[in-house]
Image (cartoon, grey):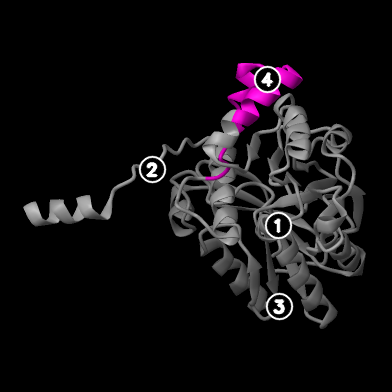
Amino acid sequence: MDNIDLQVMRQVAQWHADGHGVVMATITRTWGSAPRPPGSIVAIRDDGLITGSVSGGCIEDDLIDKARQGVLAEGRPRVVRYGIDADAAHRFGLPCGGLIELVLEPVAAHTQMPVLLERLQRGERVRRVLDIASGAVTLETAGDTDELQLTDTTLTTHLGPHWRLVIIGAGQMTQYLAEMSRALDYQVVVCDPREEYADIFAVDGVTLRREMPDDLLQALKIDGHTAVIALTHDPKLDDLALMEALASSAFYVGAIGSRANQAKRRERLKEHFGMTDAQLDRLHGPVGLKNGARTPPEIAISILAELTAVRYGYRIDAPVAVRAQAVMEVGCVS
């Protein structure tokens, strides 16, 4: 699976290679409750075909009309705004007084779409600098800060995975979790020094590392945009990863295993590695939402559902188990 940026850029590159005129529109600023955040991209082909989104659809409809009329592309990038007054806000599906600012950018040879696409397909995060006057694009490696910036002369955006997921263990469940994670905007790194697992692991766009987990996490410099999940069932590997992850600013740390195994793990981490209760309380284990998942793909879905909730600051309470017999009894009484 591909993340949203890669899907859009792959389509844009194909349309341009086929000889179509293409204009990309990037949200640069919003006021009010805009449907999509800054950095969101939509691309419109000269015959009105579209990929990506910047609103609930009304702004896209206006861009499509202009593309079909041949007035959307003007040769170089320009800034446009939608929803400046209440009437326009209502027309374009924005809250009263809302505003969305876009940069419209005709795609050309100096847009460097093939190079950008190649780097995104490798799972890289790329800083893209657009020269407003000429339309020329410079591609750089993304750094620690990734804020969108629009000045009088340039538009700087960041494409590729916005979040990082480090998975310890290259088993069957990791295959599903890695593939699904890429669609949710994660740069995925899988760590497994065991030859019997690492030698047969292969997921497009996912980096495989074969050093010990603690060495890898130290090298990656785990930050608040990183999640770490231990899936090996091997304490020698999982505990080393959790020791580093729980002491870092990772936004999510999880480990597979039963509640009994989680209790034993907490004891080991506290006794042998000196982890504090506060650090151990950050551990999500058993990993994932408790939704009855049993198969590897079901468990992967439950993990990603919990990751998403934590990312957006939502707390999901534990489910209440209801026996089928009890439900039947209630039905009989009623």
Q: Are marks 4 and 2 in contact (CB under 8 Å)?
A: no
Q: Nearer the viewer, residue 222 or 79?
A: 222
Q: Quadrant of the N terminus?
A: bottom right
Q: Specify the label residue 46 is tagged with.
A: 3
The magenta segment = 264-288
Going from N to C along the chain, the mark reached first, 1 or 2, is 1
Q: Amino acid at mark 1?
A: Arg
Task: Give the vertical position of 140 relative to 238 (above or below).
Answer: below
The mark closer to the camera, 3 or 2, is: 2
Going from N to C along the chain, the mark reached first, 4 or 3, is 3
Quadrant in the rendering for residue 277: top right
Q: Amino acid at mark 2?
A: Pro
The mark closer to the camera, 1 or 4, is: 4
Q: Report x, y in % for residue 119.
A: 87, 59
* Residue on which the image places disc 2: 319
Q: Are marks 1 and 2 in contact (CB under 8 Å)?
A: no
The mark closer to the camera, 4 or 3, is: 4
- What residue lies at 50% left-to-right and 55% top-to-bottom? 293
Going from N to C along the chain, the mark reached first, 3 or 2, is 3
The mark closer to the camera, 4 or 2, is: 4
